[in-house]
Amino acid sequence: MDRTVETRRRYGREGKAEPRNRPRDLSTWPIEDLCVTTMRTLAMDAVQKADSGHPGTPMALAPLAFVLWDRIMRYDPRDPDWFDRDRFVLSAGHACMLQYAALHLTGYDLALDEIRRFRQWDSKAPGHPEVERTPGVETTTGPLGQGIMNSVGMAIAEAHLAAVFNRPGHEVVDHRTFAICSDGDLMEGASHEAASLAGHLKLGKLVWIYDNNHITIEGDTALAYSDDVARRFEAYGWHVQDVGERANDLDALTEALNTACDETERPSLIIVRSHIAWGAPEKQDTAAAHGSPLGEDEVRATKRRYGWPENETFLVPPGVREHMGRAVERGRALHAAWDEKMAAFRQAHPELAARFEAARIGDLPEGWDRDIPTFSAEEGPMATRAASGKVMEALAPRLPWLIGGAADLAGSTKTLLPDTKDFEAPSPGGRNFHWGIREHGMAAASTGMALHGGVRPFASTFFIFTDYARPAIRLAALTRQPVVYVLTHDSIGLGEDGPTHQPVEHLASFRAMPNVYVMRPADANEVAFAWRVALERRDGPTLLVLSRQKLRVLDRRDGLASAEGVRRGGYVLAAERGERPDLILLASGSEVEIALQARERLKQDGIDARVVSLACWELFRAQPASYREQVLPPDVKARLAVEAASPFGWEAWVGDAGAVIGVDRFGASAPWKEIYEHYGLTAEHVVRRGRSLVSSPVRDERPYEEEHHE
């Protein structure tokens, strides 16, 4: 019998919800049927044993997963990081048992015992996919919408690298990005940013499969969702196929995926109407199958309907492991063929190949920071955003894989790279990105680019607009991706735009986020070293938080320490004159200059003050205790911090006897110097508080606003 006809007879062309009666002797089953059912039952068993998880979607999409891993995708289970592999993103991360089953059966380093320990401590099968934990997982997913935004970044990186490095007869970058998304992914507004951008950029090697199963946690999607998804994506400029009720038709799924792969001018969306918990007698097509185990009785009843041994758990028939395990040899052959391509590429284009290798590894080339300027005081006051722009100009020629852009703000954030094209559909080799007003999509796609490899992404916007990008920045931190965020207009110092644009709580909130470096440099030379720190870092994102207003370029010839101290997060910028300081003034960014001015005035009162530039708390906290105590001697209790932001968190540095001058309310619309005056961010106010601390080193609990007139 024709294989297509047989497949449709077994599964039902229109996806009939009830399994057909099958013999209980598994040795008589068609191998594809056996593989699909194994994936379904592994998901059921793992969730049931953990007494936690989402069994319904893996049960519904097992045929799709089988087709992807067995017929469509190019990958090497023995080398999950092979560069020219296809990328797969499970944006519907709650369905992770679908991916774990596929990875286990195709020979990745994910043992059945790990699946038995699904959602348990230190298992390689956690409750949502985690890129650092499970071989074969490309990104950490779970918050809906994030994965598909990552996938856009992966497709961007592939398109860019292909344009830069491929030559006729030497296509060394040639792979696709596949993503499974859910109703929830597409309901999230972030999906609009990602899909709109992908359509505009004509990312022809991006394929999304939309699992249209009609179920969310609260019930049928009709409760809140009636979008015409096909027309929506057609309006974005995508190629759209709707296979309807053929989620169980292996050949229909194969045909749709092959058609999507053949479409190279547009990204592709395949809509699949699946049935959650397919085959479960009581829970199919119900919300009960979404986020909870089926229950022991329902699991047995479902297996009985499948014709599966109902009392067996985690059963993998030998034929399944043999059939799907062929992916190991297939992957080895694909990888070897690519290695031959690379050898020919090196011979034909040795310089280009060397650059490609360097980009893939991500190491900084020798002399990469040689042209970063050293700024002199004579250059006059300079906003740290402007200094950052000059540093980027120096970096661009020496780091050709540094790419990125701003969310429609490049002129303000000073992030256009010189002498390079824009990344657009006709010119994917360009390095300047115009993300449009899509902060969330920009940040998540930048993470996807970093995860893909071969490029070093930066993303830029006003600091206040990280409110739109924060979820993606958090996942960059969770996945330890070295994205550089260039964030300007860092405080109430931006002035007349007022409180809607003036970040107050943002420094504190990002300092509370694990694995993020928050760097707020005090002048142009601190900016130069902050960029060095950001690019040398490989294990997480760095936020360069920069000023709009001009700041004095500190004259290091006046006894001030080198800005290289920024490499340690905090350093003694201006030392005391005597053997021991009477007072330590701590600040970051624009307020360092205020602290220096206050130090000079305190000298007239006989108070010997030290000024510490604390540009990056995280870096400073990582220094040896001996260094931290050298910068902040424990026996000096009189400490005063000043920062144009929430004082939250500074207590860790000033101690119980110290004080903080900060901003614990929203900003105001006025020239920045006037706002600083009203908010007590002046040298005069620092002097007054400093005197108070030295004369009576007991913390004054009154808010600083009570000490000056509005």
Image (spheres, rainbow, N blue to C red):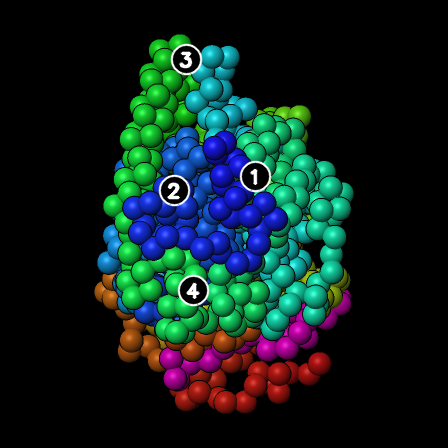
Q: Nearer the viewer, mark 1 or mark 4?
A: 4
The residue pinned by badge 4 equals 302
- Mark 1 and mark 4 lie on one chain; the one further toward the N terminus is 1
Q: Is residue 700 magenta?
A: no
The residue pinned by badge 2 equals 30
- Mark 3 vs mark 4, CA separation in Å: 58 Å
- Mark 1 and mark 2 lie on one chain; the one further toward the N terminus is 2
- Mark 3 and mark 2 lie on one chain; the one further toward the N terminus is 2
The structure residue drawn at horizontal position 68% and vertical position 83%, both measured from the top left corner, is 709
Height in image: 311 above or below 368?
below
Q: Dot 3: what SS? A: loop
Q: Dot 2: what SS? A: loop
- Mark 4 vs mark 2, CA separation in Å: 19 Å
Q: Is residue 57 left or right of residue 340?
A: right
Q: Dot 1: what SS? A: helix
**Which quadrant is the C terminus positioned in?**
bottom right
- Mark 1 vs mark 3, CA separation in Å: 42 Å
Q: Dot 4: what SS? A: helix
